[in-house]
Image (cartoon, helix red, strand yellow):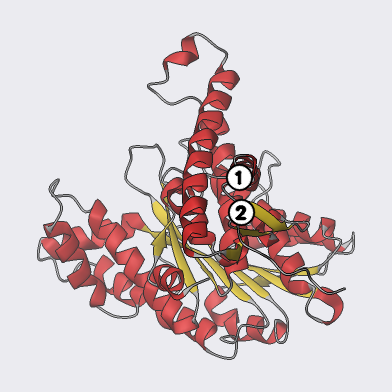
Amino acid sequence: MDMDGYTQLREGAVAKGTSSGLLDQQRTQSVFKHKLLEDYVLPFAEMTGSKVEGRRVVVVDGFAGRGRYPDGQPGSAELMLRTAERASRAAIEPILVEKKPADFKQLAAVAMEYRARGVRAETLPDDVLQHLPLIIERASGVPLFLFLDPCGANLPYDALAAVVSGPRRPLWPATEVLLNFSADLTRRASGALKAGLLDHDALPVMDRTCGGPWWREVALAAQASSSAGGFERAAFAVVEEYARRLGVAGGMYPMTIPVRRRVHHQPVYHLVFLTRRSHGVWVFATALAQARQEWMRALGPAEDDVTTTLFSFGDAVEGQIDAEQRQARGAVAANLRSLVAKRPVFRLVDQPWEIFGEAYGVATEPTVRQAIDDLERSRQIRVVERKRHVRDWRVARPETFIAPTRP
């Protein structure tokens, strides 16, 4: 990745294709998030585990809850356990933490089922904050994926910054973080600040979450610039600066993903993703796109979709998904044409943000491949090296001479 793309990501890129996420019903609220975990944790483990002895990878759910819903559906913790069980090219070791005693009891029972089938899972009671030193010790010398998804405020910024900027700051072994940053809390605290309620209990919570009072000025400036006069812009501005700071502390690419109940609603929260490699940026883009499609199927047709009355419910949703992918394919093709005009030869995974652009979180990897095939058929681009994964392909201008690789 070139420095321009690196700087753009380091300064807090927003995945615009994922501007819709949560669902209204309790059972389906986490469809987007759970699909994202399901499609990302395994590739992360297989990519990074291949570089360490025993292929060990530690994955952590810091707010694991019961692990499984009362209706038998898996929660985030059980999804990690399932991933560990089916992994064949990585030895995934889940660490699951839950503070509430009743929920921890159920979580421990779920984990025991998987331990009986050979999964090396560990369950820890109480607050994840007190377990961070132990988690870092357990993951010493091996990759670590940290998932932090509380219902309210997340861990204090200083604690998270210490994790990503301490012994785990080097490129290897890999460290990645996916966390929940509450937009509801940001709006509530910003509203209190705007009203002069300086003793409101949300303000010190935000100070701890953000690592200081810097967010106050950011939120007020964003709110003042909003023509609507609300605090949605403040929520975006604060999380983007938070992600940027955490990314700088850890030498990581930060991305923020707004998650809403409905397309036109304000975000309930943002997911913040941090990785140190462009491979992570690329694979996360594909996982986001798959999660978005899962969410669309669960949510149903858009409220203004007139085709719903002409076709079945499912057909209408698939039509929306197909239309999104066609548009995304055109956007990716345009981005590739721009790239080959500037760089005669490049590997796709080294330019993820430039290739996906506005289609980040919408375009799937098959859609990217279709865009490349279209350009190659029209002789606007040439694939000079094909590998198992599209992301590892090298492409070039049609007229570029590529010296043969020595055997």
Question: Can residue 67 be seen by looking at this rendering?
Answer: no
Q: Residue at x 53, y 82 (%)?
A: 164
Q: Alpha-carbon neighbours of circle 1 within 10 Å: few (<14), some, or many (≥20)?
A: few
- Is tag 1's residue or tag 2's residue first in the polypeptide sequence? 1
Q: CA distance from mark 1 to mark 2?
A: 6 Å
Judged left or right of residue 151, residue 380 is right
Q: In the rendered structure, are the residues bearing label 1 and label 2 in contact, judged by CB atoms less than 8 Å apart? A: yes
Q: Alpha-carbon neighbours of circle 2 within 10 Å: few (<14), some, or many (≥20)?
A: some
Q: Residue at x 24, y 63 (%)?
A: 189
- The single residue placed furthest to the top in the displayed view is 310
Residue 394 in the image, given as x and y percentages of width and height: 66, 61
Residue 407 in the image, given as x and y percentages of width and height: 88, 73
Q: Nearer the viewer, residue 197 or 402?
A: 402
Residue 11 in the image, given as x and y percentages of width and height: 37, 71
**In which quarter of the view is residue 170 placed?**
bottom right
Q: Residue at x 61, y 42 (%)?
A: 367
In the image, is residue 346 above or below residue 310? below
> Mark 2 sits on what residue?
398
Judged left or right of residue 11, residue 128 is right
Q: Nearer the viewer, residue 395 or 224?
A: 395
Residue 249 in the image, given as x and y percentages of width and height: 44, 83
**In which quarter of the view is residue 153 placed?**
bottom left
Q: Nearer the viewer, residue 248 or 216?
A: 248
Q: Nearer the viewer, residue 64 or 324?
A: 324
Amino acid bearing label 2:
Pro
> Mark 1 sits on what residue?
379
Count of number-bearing discs: 2
In the image, is residue 37 above or below residue 52? above
Amino acid bearing label 1:
Arg
Question: Can residue 191 be seen by looking at this rendering?
Answer: yes
Looking at the rendered structure, the secondary structure element under dot 2 is loop
Q: Residue at x 58, y 26 (%)?
A: 318
